Image (tube, rainbow, N blue to C red):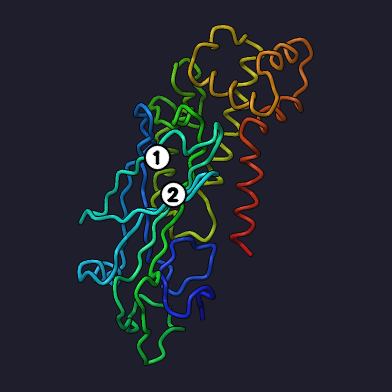
């Protein structure tokens, strides 16, 4: 029997690393495009999806409302979603971010009124008590997944994963673009990756985070080794290089000095250390998150 200790009534939760009161196949997901840099603010285009007929019926009957929640290191805000298609254009001013930050975006659905929730086949069998659950106004009835953007003042990521049709296995790292470092993967990898991305909410462990952390960690080691072996001068005006430099500056590391030192005396452990500082221990955090989900 599964019960959600945080609530005395059934709540749909998409994070499978926590206890939930709905069966595992049901979810509330928030999707979000990469942020758009728009003068003095960043725009995040979001949309909610749920496969729960129970939650969809509550929404269509007006018993509940959906909200977008975001949090930076400075503040937390919540906004009601009024669009019937559950889309919301989230606008966050520059001033709401630190120079290096992260943005956590999620969604909740709360009650607009008091009502009774009857047991149905979407809810875990442990909640079949033959009596209704009483939901009161403002009670949370569903909690979505959480999307995290590592943020810098560019408002964009510097790494993109793309399909490359001529690759038959593995992946390659392309640093020739001005905007992004490209992780180019073979078609079968991209197909499998997309399946994991869609099914992540149904998995107990954060598989997508583990894939991201492994790929990005390997890619950035590749990038730093090429900057050391091939030289970095031709890349210094590229946006992705400037982001790496500004990120490391916040940690009292001068990128050009570090690269020059490693060109004279290559120490692979120092390369790993440099990558780890830039990624803010992303690989360690991903493993810890996976471990927590399995407890």
Mark 2 surroundings: few (<14), some (14-19) or many (≥20) residues within 10 A: many
Question: How far separated are the C-alphas under marks 1 and 2?
Answer: 9 Å
Residue occupying the far bottom of the picture: 130
Q: Residue shown at 41%/59% (left/top)?
A: 144
Counting residues from the N terminus, which is met first, the one under dot 1 or under dot 2? 2
- Rendered location of residue 193, percent (x, y): 44, 43
Mark 1–mark 2 contact, CB under 8 Å? yes
| Residue at 51%, 81% in the rendered image | 1
- Give above or below for 191 relative to 122: above
> Could you tell me residue 262's position as x and y percent?
74, 15
Q: Residue 261 vs residue 202: left or right?
A: right
Q: Give the image quarter of residue 217.
A: top right
Residue at the disc numbered 1? 92
Report the disc number at residue 230: none
Residue tagged 2: 70
45 up-or-down from 112: above or below: above
- Secondary structure of the residue carrying tag 2 is strand
């Amino acid at each position: 029997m599964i019960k959600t200790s945080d609530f005395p009534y059934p709540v749909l939760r998409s994070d499978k690393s926590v206890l939930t009161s709905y069966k595992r196949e049901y979810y509330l997901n928030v999707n979000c495009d990469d942020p758009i840099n728009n003068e003095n603010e960043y725009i995040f285009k979001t949309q909610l999806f749920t496969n729960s007929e129970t939650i969809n019926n509550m929404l269509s009957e007006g018993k509940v409302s959906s909200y977008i929640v975001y949090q930076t290191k400075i503040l937390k805000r919540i906004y009601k979603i009024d669009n019937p298609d559950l889309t919301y254009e989230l606008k966050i001013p520059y001033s709401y971010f630190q120079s290096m930050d992260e943005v956590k975006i999620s969604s909740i659905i709360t009650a607009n009124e008091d009502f009774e929730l009857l047991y149905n086949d979407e809810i875990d069998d442990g909640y079949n008590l033959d009596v209704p659950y009483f939901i009161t106004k403002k009670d949370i009835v569903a909690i979505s997944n959480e999307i995290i953007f590592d943020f810098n003042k560019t408002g964009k990521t510097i790494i993109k994963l793309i399909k490359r049709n001529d690759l038959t296995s593995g992946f390659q790292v392309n640093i020739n673009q001005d905007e992004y470092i490209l992780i180019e993967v073979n078609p079968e990898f991209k197909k499998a990756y997309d399946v994991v991305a869609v099914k992540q909410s149904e998995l107990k462990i954060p598989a997508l985070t583990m894939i991201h952390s492994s790929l990005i960690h390997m890619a950035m080691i590749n990038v730093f080794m090429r900057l050391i072996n091939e030289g970095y001068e031709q890349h210094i005006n590229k946006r992705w290089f400037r982001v790496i430099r500004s990120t490391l500056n916040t940690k009292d590391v001068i990128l050009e000095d570090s690269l020059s030192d490693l060109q004279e005396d290559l120490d692979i452990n120092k390369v790993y250390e440099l990558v780890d500082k830039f990624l803010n221990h992303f690989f360690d955090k991903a493993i810890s998150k996976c471990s927590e989900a399995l407890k």
